């Protein structure tokens, strides 16, 4: 298989560097080769992930989008020890490097696709009719990997994405990623709770929604309050550990929720921590994730404030 961390798309969709040499691969990691018309992005190896370690790593690749394109297909693959892998683009290029992600980087990273789970393969993602993931010309490719080593041995981690692009279509509307998150909580031993509230600044249509906690989650409640209206409870569930990898999605594609400026989402989280140490973000999480349209970029609200806005 010929794959590099700095690849050029043969149809000139991407402008980057290319090499005939084989890239470094974690032993036993064998993502399938890209299919017809696809390109494969491979992250550098994240080395020496220690037992109990929790790391979110951003890898800026030597690969760029040459012109605006729509994503026709995306599939992700990762080694053991992963919580999630995400493919992004960014308008703020960096020299190719890998480092622990910073919160403010999320302002400038635009979601292309991703998956969650240990040694996972992402399912095919079907968007509602007329919606599409759109990538912007000139943006750099970034792979974010989140590693949770729950074993007893030191691990090396790696991820890959196979992506197929197609020309943009004026008949399709871009959709993007919505996040409302609390990053300041303390999950103390025993029972604890936190919440986050965010008011929208512009009108959007929300077509998908889920709560997001990790393994210590006990309960999540998501409510929506329109300006001048009463609270509507959308999700009120006892948390299941598997949802931290595969969230239970509220699918509203047939009747998207119309959100106007001033309307609010509110998230309540509860945890049950059997350990004797306090757990913080990002080892645990409290918030919601979802999909919305129309978009020119993702929408991220941390602790009540919109990033980048």
Image: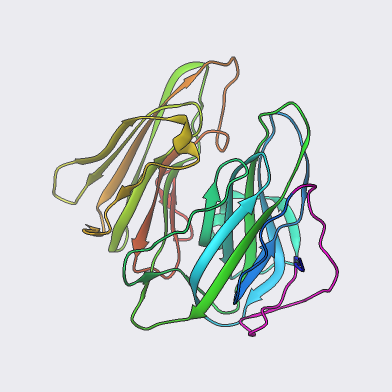
Q: Nearer the viewer, residue 223 or 262?
A: 223
Q: Is residue 216 left or right of residue 293?
A: right
Q: Is residue 89 left or right of residue 93?
A: left
Image location of residue 218, percent across then percent down? 41, 25
Instruction: Identify whether 220 is placed above or below 27.
Output: above
Q: On the rendered image, what quadrant is the C terminus found in?
A: bottom left
Residue shown at the point (45%, 66%) measured from the top left: 297
Residue depicted at x 23% and y 59%: 254
The correct choice, above or below, for 275 with respect to 122 in the image is above
Residue 232 picture location, percent across and down: 19, 42
Can I make out residue 17 in this image?
A: yes
* Left or right position of 109 against 60: left
Work out whether 53 lies above or below 110: above
**Rendered location of residue 268, percent (x, y):** 35, 33
Indicate whether residue 16 is drawn in magenta. yes
Residue 213 seen by the camera: no
Give the residue drawn at x 47%, y 56%. Answer: 307
Is 69 contained in the magenta span? no
Residue 239 in percent (x, y) is at 39, 30
Q: Residue furthest right?
A: 21
Name the one closer to the observer, 305 or 122.
122
Predominant secondary structure, magenta span: loop
Magenta stretch in the rendered image: 6-28
User: Residue at image x 57%, y 51%?
Assistant: 121
Q: Is residue 245 left or right of residue 16?
A: left
């Amino acid at each position: 298989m010929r794959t590099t961390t700095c690849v050029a798309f043969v149809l000139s969709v991407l402008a980057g560097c290319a090499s005939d040499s084989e890239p470094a691969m974690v032993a036993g990691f064998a993502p399938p080769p890209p299919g017809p018309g696809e390109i494969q992005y491979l992250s550098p190896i994240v080395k020496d992930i220690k037992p109990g370690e929790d790391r979110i790593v951003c890898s800026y690749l030597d690969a760029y989008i040459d012109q605006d394109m729509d994503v026709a297909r995306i599939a992700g693959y990762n080694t053991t020890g992963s919580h999630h892998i995400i493919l992004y683009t960014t308008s703020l290029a960096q020299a190719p490097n890998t480092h622990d992600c910073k919160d403010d980087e999320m302002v400038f990273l635009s979601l292309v696709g991703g998956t969650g789970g240990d040694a996972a393969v992402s399912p095919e993602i079907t968007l509602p009719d007329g919606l599409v993931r759109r990538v912007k010309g000139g943006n750099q490719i970034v792979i974010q990997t989140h590693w949770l080593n729950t074993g007893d041995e030191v691990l090396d981690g790696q991820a890959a994405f196979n992506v197929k692009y197609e020309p943009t279509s004026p008949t399709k509307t871009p959709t993007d990623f919505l996040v409302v998150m609390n990053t300041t909580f303390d999950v103390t031993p025993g029972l604890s709770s936190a919440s986050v509230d965010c008011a929208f600044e512009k009108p959007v249509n929300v077509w998908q929604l889920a709560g997001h906690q990790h393994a210590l989650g006990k309960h999540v409640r998501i409510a929506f309050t329109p300006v001048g209206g009463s609270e509507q409870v959308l999700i009120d569930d006892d948390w299941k550990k598997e949802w931290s990898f595969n969230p239970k999605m509220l699918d509203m594609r047939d009747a998207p929720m119309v959100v106007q400026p001033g309307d609010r989402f509110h998230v309540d989280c509860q945890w049950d921590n059997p350990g004797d140490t306090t757990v913080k973000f990002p080892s645990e999480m409290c918030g919601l994730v979802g999909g919305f349209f129309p978009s020119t970029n993702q929408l991220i609200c941390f602790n009540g404030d919109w990033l980048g806005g």
